[in-house]
Amino acid sequence: MILAPKRVSFQGELGANSHIAAKDVFPNADVLPCPSFEDAFAAVQNGDADLGMIPIENSIAGRVADVHHLLPHAGLSIIGEYFLPIRFQLMAIKGASLATIKSARSHIMGIGQCRLMIRKLGLKPVVSGDTAGSAREVAEAGDPTQAAIAPRLAAEVYGLDILAEDIEDAAHNTTRFVILSRQKIWAAPGQNCLTSFVFQVRNVPAALFKAMGGFATNGVNMTKLESHMIGGRFVATEFYAEIEGHPDDRPVKLALEELAFFAKELTILGVYPQHPWRNEVEKQIAE
């Protein structure tokens, strides 16, 4: 992994959760906010950023669909992952209070994850394009009846007061990010790592079942398997998968060879260390 990138791109505005993730992992790097995921990917592709910090899934909302469509064809490599607990704050301009606010503005996911507080305060939810962007809009409006639901960093960036802290409905709300690089940097064999790849199966009976059989017979743990249509065609499907282990590990090598026999296309997107968060979750479950 590039340990000292000069600039990291992310989708969203300053103060977004992706901004927080980028600064958590690379505190000394500059950040490059981008209006769309395509722009965040392009910034890494063309060299405007050294790395990209991209959300791939959320413990409540599930996968980030746009990212799964972009990853296979971006020509970028996944070199790491990061898990960020999501905490939402209710914020407004200075002088506003819980008694003055009438509406709460946020991204649709932010509103959906803070329904209990919105209902408790009797606020009108207003959908905005971005959590941090909603904070900027509230700051620019200067209206004490408007509030935003956004990360704490957004309050600092846009000079807002936090009226209520950690208002999310679910305490386990967590987003997983992947770190993207132009360089193909694989974790060294022997590490506790993940391998991410995409594939299409041949159009023969039970092809997916047969393709997956190699992972079971070789004792390789598959942590994720998701599908999406290709080009809007119901008969064309691409699969995104993640497994524990390194392609140079003998069990993984044998499983991938068997998969390749039944696959039309197989592309490894990255081989990278597992984030320590995974072990912490396993400990909590065991307890």
Image: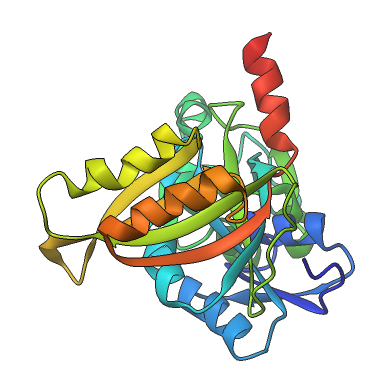
Residue sitting nearer the eye, 271 or 128: 271
Q: At 59% from the left edge and 70% from the top edge, which residue is drawn?
A: 77
Q: At 58% from the left edge and 62% from the top edge, which residue is drawn?
A: 270
Q: Is residue 46 left or right of residue 268?
A: right
Looking at the rendering, in which quadrant would you find the N terminus? bottom right
Residue 285: percent from the left, percent from the top?
Answer: 62, 15
Toward the top, the furthest residue is 287
Q: Is residue 70 left or right of residue 120?
A: left
Residue sitting nearer the eye, 113 or 3: 3
Location of residue 279 by image quarter: top right
Residue 149: in sight, yes or no?
Answer: no
Looking at the rendering, in which quadrant would you find the C terminus? top right
Q: At 42% from the left edge and 69% from the top edge, which residue is drawn?
A: 72
Toward the bottom, the furthest residue is 46
Residue 4: in sight, yes or no?
Answer: yes
Residue 169: percent from the left, percent from the top?
Answer: 53, 27
Residue 246: percent from the left, percent from the top?
Answer: 62, 51
Above or below, 117 relative to 24? above
Location of residue 136 by image quarter: bottom right
Q: At 61% from the left edge and 32% from the top edge, which residue is drawn?
A: 167
Indicate the colouring scheme: rainbow
